[in-house]
Image (cartoon, helix red, strand yellow):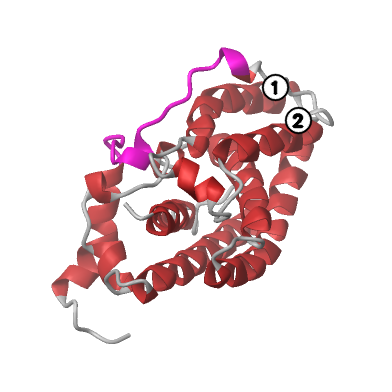
Amino acid sequence: MDPTLDLLYRLADDQLILGHRNSEWNGLGPILEEDIAFSSMAQDKLGHSLQLYTLLHELGEAEPDTVAFTRNAPQFHCCQLTELPIGEYDFSLIRHFLFDHAELLRFEALADSSYEPLALVARKIKGELKYHVLHANTWVKRLGTATEEAITRMQAALEFTLPYALGIFETTAAEPEIISSGLFIGEEELQRRWEESIAKVLAQTALTLPDLRLLTPVTGGRHGQHTEHLQPLLDEMAEVFRLDPTADW
């Protein structure tokens, strides 16, 4: 696949799938504030995916709705972290913390991409992601220094989620050209920055960051290998679109 298309599909699919997952907290948040926050962040992520799918369309790919709602799981390039069910709030919060730290750093780097249309989109997206990271940091610090039960649950969620989070940085065959062409700094450098970023926040809590070198990353998503959870989510997402693909909203 062309390096620019490869990169854009990974970016867009991550945003689309996690946006839909976060939207599942609508009406279920532990407090009203979090209900609203997760719904708002979900809306942002769906908006980000639309901007990225639009760039793909401008490069000759199908229209955004077609790309988003007519592919099956093996055709998606999202990391497996994004497709996991929302579970309990501690898991969704830790996923949000780990993913959005990576995304903020990613889009800050993409703001200098050699592909100017992507750089322009990244400059807009990174501003919204700063608020996502601020939200995540606030709650990780709050719960990570709270009661013994809260700390225990957050630590368990962190240890469960980290191997999936390492899958964010899975590379594809296009990686060398993506770096050499100036499209993006590359996943290895992004992961290095991410590790520093999350470590600084966790150091302000009672949570312990495991040695990431000892963890086995959960990969495959960038190559169309997904969990059992993705296809049912795609079927649900596409239900209305497939009833009448020509409908205007």
Measured from the top left, where is residue 119 in percent x and y? 60, 67
Q: Is residue 46 left or right of residue 203?
A: left
Identify the residue shown where x is 19% and y is 77%.
245
* Vertical comparison of 58 with 171: above or below: below
Instruction: Find disc 1 in the rendering and name its residue.
Output: 209
Judge by depth and name the residue closer to the eye, 141 or 28: 141
Q: Is residue 192 left or right of residue 162?
A: right
Identify the residue shown where x is 38% and y is 76%.
58
Give yes or no for contact between labels 2 and 1 (Cβ–Cβ under 8 Å).
yes
Mark 2 belongs to which amino acid? Ala
Q: Residue furthest bottom?
A: 248
Measured from the top left, where is residue 168 in percent x and y? 50, 38
Q: Is residue 66 left or right of residue 41?
A: left
Question: If you read the primary sequence from the N terminus, does the residue marked by circle 2 or circle 1 appear first?
Answer: 2
Judge by depth and name the residue closer to the eye, 36 or 219: 219
* Vertical comparison of 229 with 125: above or below: above
Identify the residue shown where x is 46% and y is 35%.
170
Mark 1 belongs to which amino acid? Leu
Q: Residue furthest top?
A: 214
Q: Residue furthest right?
A: 204
Which element carries disc 2, helix, strand or loop?
A: helix
Q: Residues within 10 Å of mark 2 (few under 14, many from 20)?
A: few
For the record, the magenta segment spans: 213-229
Instruction: Find disc 2 in the rendering and name its residue.
Output: 199
